[in-house]
Amino acid sequence: MGAEKPIKCLAITSKDGQLEDWEYTPEPLKPGDVDVRVLYNGLCHSDLHVWREDWGPCPFPMVPGHEVVGVVEEVGSSVNHLKKGDLVGVGWFRDACLECDACVKGDDNVCPNGVGTIMGGQKGGFAERIRANAALAQLIPPEIDPAEAAPLLCAGITVWSPISRYVTRSGMKVGVVGLGGLGHLALQFASAIGADVYAISGTASKEKEARGFGAKHFQKIDDVPDKTLDVILNTTPGGIKCADLVNKLTYNGQLVYLGGGTDKVDVLAFDLILAQRSISGSATGGRALFREMFRIAGLHNVRPLIEKIPISKANEAVEKLTNGNVRYRIVLETGDYFKNK
């Protein structure tokens, strides 16, 4: 086989740096891999967390992008379920062992040998193409626009995972804290399966949109009566006291952390014990949940509200995200940017 062709991309070279042109040579294509020509990238807070080292040291240069939609350009010798020209997405994980108990059950997102798309020195989707295990390249349904599919690959699956697990009957009272990229999708998914949805936000200007996304109630956290909610999804980056959220749960209630990875979960055990409440975290989802999520999104028209920006303006997009000026997800269009480099 010939030498691998370098991949042109945008990379961060230091914790406080900006995205700049770079290129790298990928490892050889394995039998189970696919090469994907990138069309779109959702811009997620987790990209920023990684390169700003909020979650630990980051090997630089770092190529962001883990909500990646593109077209299959090359398939490994053992790949039979995908072909050139298929529209696929790559989310938070690009590889897994596919043999452990978690993988066999379709929960490859918790595979002990899983490989993140942007963690640990891996190179993400802010690039002309990306290479991943074909088993984790999700087919995008034809009824979902490719640009709108991108945020579903992280934000969408991240909220669908706990909703599918804990919202088990129609009419359950579900609180969604934070109405950003994750929150606006959580409102839609919870509403789609018949929940009584509470949008919990201090930004009054978001009320009309929140109700359009399926919320029946719009309140600040302090205005939600105690012992009301069956499930609370905390999608915020952090800063809300755990005890304040737990007090809003009814008996057998479930508080789920989806954001706020640096928050301290500090609550009196008796507040859990006496009402049989639980606190958990949720990490994206595996192949089984991806298929389920896309079916629900297709049936109920669950879509992110996106703002498309050329990848040439990626640093401006990052600034908008950092300043909280996004409603509700930026999607970067690759276009011909890398062809001209």
Image (cartoon, helix red, strand yellow):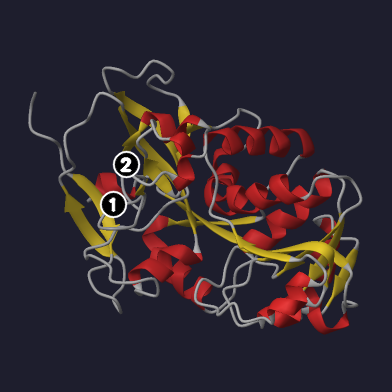
Residue under the image location 55 percent in, 78 percent down: 263
Q: Which mark is residue 143?
A: none
Residue under the image location 31 percent in, 41 percent down: 129
Disc 1 + disc 2, Cβ < 8 Å: yes
| Label 2 crowd (10 A; few <14 / some 14-19 / many >=20) | many
Question: What is the x, y in percent for residue 7?
Answer: 22, 45
Question: What is the x, y in percent for residue 43?
Answer: 48, 59
Q: Nearer the viewer, residue 8 or 152?
A: 152
> Is residue 287 shown left or right of residue 93?
right
> Is residue 188 shown left or right of residue 223?
left
Amino acid type for the residue under numbered disc 2: Ile
Q: Which mark is residue 123?
A: 1
Query: Which quadrant of the structure image shows residue 336?
Result: top left
Q: Which residue is mark 2?
A: 130
Label 2, secondary structure: give it.
strand
Amino acid type for the residue under numbered disc 1: Lys
Is residue 32 visible from the viewing direction of this image? yes
Q: Nearer the viewer, residue 78 or 114?
A: 114
Up-down relation of residue 140 to residue 262 (above or below): above
| Label 1 crowd (10 A; few <14 / some 14-19 / many >=20) | many
Inter-mark Cα distance, 1 to 2: 8 Å
Question: What is the x, y in percent for residue 46?
Answer: 46, 64
